[in-house]
Image (cartoon, helix red, strand yellow):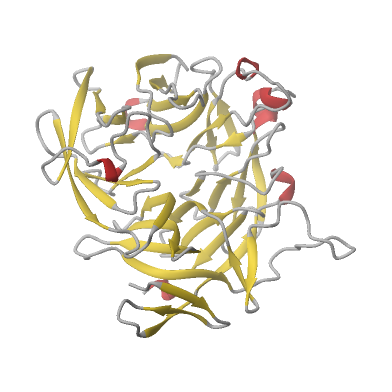
Amino acid sequence: MSKFLRLTGLFLLATSANGAVVAEDWLWSVAHAVPKETTSEGSGYFSLVEGHDGKLYVGTAKYQQNAYLVRFDPATKAMDVVLDAHREIGTDATGFAAQAKFHTRNNVGRSGRIYLGTKQGYARNGEKPIAYPGGYPMVYDPKTGKTRVYPIPVPHHGIISVTPDESRGVAYVSTCSDERPVDSTWFTILDLETGEYRHLLDCRHLYAFVVVDHLGRAYHPVLGGDVVRWDPRSEKLERLKQTIDGKPPTEESLLATETGHPVNWEVSPDRKTLYAVAMSGNALFAYDLTAAGTTLPGRRIGPLVAGATKTDCRAMCVGPDGTVWAGVATTIEKRQTLRLVSWSPGDEPPRDHGPIAISNPDYTTFTDGDGKPLKHHHGVHRIDGNLVPRYTIMAVNAARDGTVYLTTLYPFTLHAFAKEKLR
């Protein structure tokens, strides 16, 4: 892997360990600007999914004000707002009391309904955490255009995960108090008909993603590295130890820490394998959800980007064909590029598709009428004339037609990569 990067107008030049110069082609995206009125600072989070209708659904963050669900039509390239959080809730709260984010990874039920939830923003000017009333799980139905809003499950907590099991009429919710260094995160069952909650455990693991396996069992990470599993058939909550290649997770893996570290989870299409990436860990892991007993056996697949000195991976998904996709901010010799990585069963190791650049640099405006740079548009920069996203990738989703989408910040942008470009 390269030790030094130099950027040119057409590709990135990398100097390998033996001194040879090799070329990495840019991975060109087609960029689409998320409507600027739906964000306050050009920001968004994990909230991205393809609906059964083939359209993309993107959640936004408008700090101190509101949150929106935006629909993108790949056929027409049009975007429109389909869910206004405050209008659905019936509130006009501002400041820290506002529902400032859709931070949940959007999940789609068998019915085609989209599951998501609102979350707190950031306290300013002496605002107290208690000012935030709590987040609301929501279910948006693309067929009818209607949204059902469920009650706040835990006062003053936001919603970080809503995962449906429509066959049982429930959704699994994880809350977040947003305290530091240790968050309070309640693993909760929502009855989709009555709107009632059953609280299972405060797992205290920040940014938790709930997943459901092939037997309908729901999993939630626990601070310190354990995993709890709820079995709806026996109505029992089990606490599992995890192993990686037969041993407890190492400190370097960041899978089991005293204060917690964000870990992205997603299951395979058959729900028999759980994939995981620690945000700063530069490694992909897989767990066997079919294993018996009270140990969750995992294995290390390999590094996301070989030779990287630093990685930031907040975006990971599993596509309909079982391919794992990750959006990674990668640092090599103090130079950062944003890269798209994939792994399919049988691959060794994960495949780095290269550094991302924008093929349509005029996709949005970056200056005002006087030619001055617009505020919160600093998330892109020019490298020898090429427009390149510069900070981090927030979400990734693989569509059924093979297109891969991801989002970047400042301005909030949806990038599309045609399957022909990813071979």
At x 43%, y 34%, the residue is 207
User: How many circles with numbers are drawn on the protein?
Assistant: 0
Q: Please provide percent x and percent y for residue 286.
A: 23, 48
Left or right of 422 in this view: 104: right
| Residue at the spot 54% in from the left edge and 36% down from the top edge | 140
Seen in the picture, residue 324 relative to 240 is either above or below; the reply is: below
Residue 300 at x, y percent in the picture:
21, 51
**Left or right of 248, for residue 404:** right
Q: For residue 407, say whether it is visible.
A: yes
Percent x, y for residue 302? 24, 58
Residue at image position (33%, 65%) is 307
Q: Quadrant of the C terminus?
A: bottom left
Quarter-wise, where is residue 373 in the image?
bottom right
> Is 230 left or right of 244, judged from the image as shown?
right
The residue closer to the viewer here, 21 or 109, is 21
Q: Nearer the viewer, residue 234 or 159?
A: 159
Relative depth, front residue between 278 and 252? 252
Most extreme residue toward the right is 370
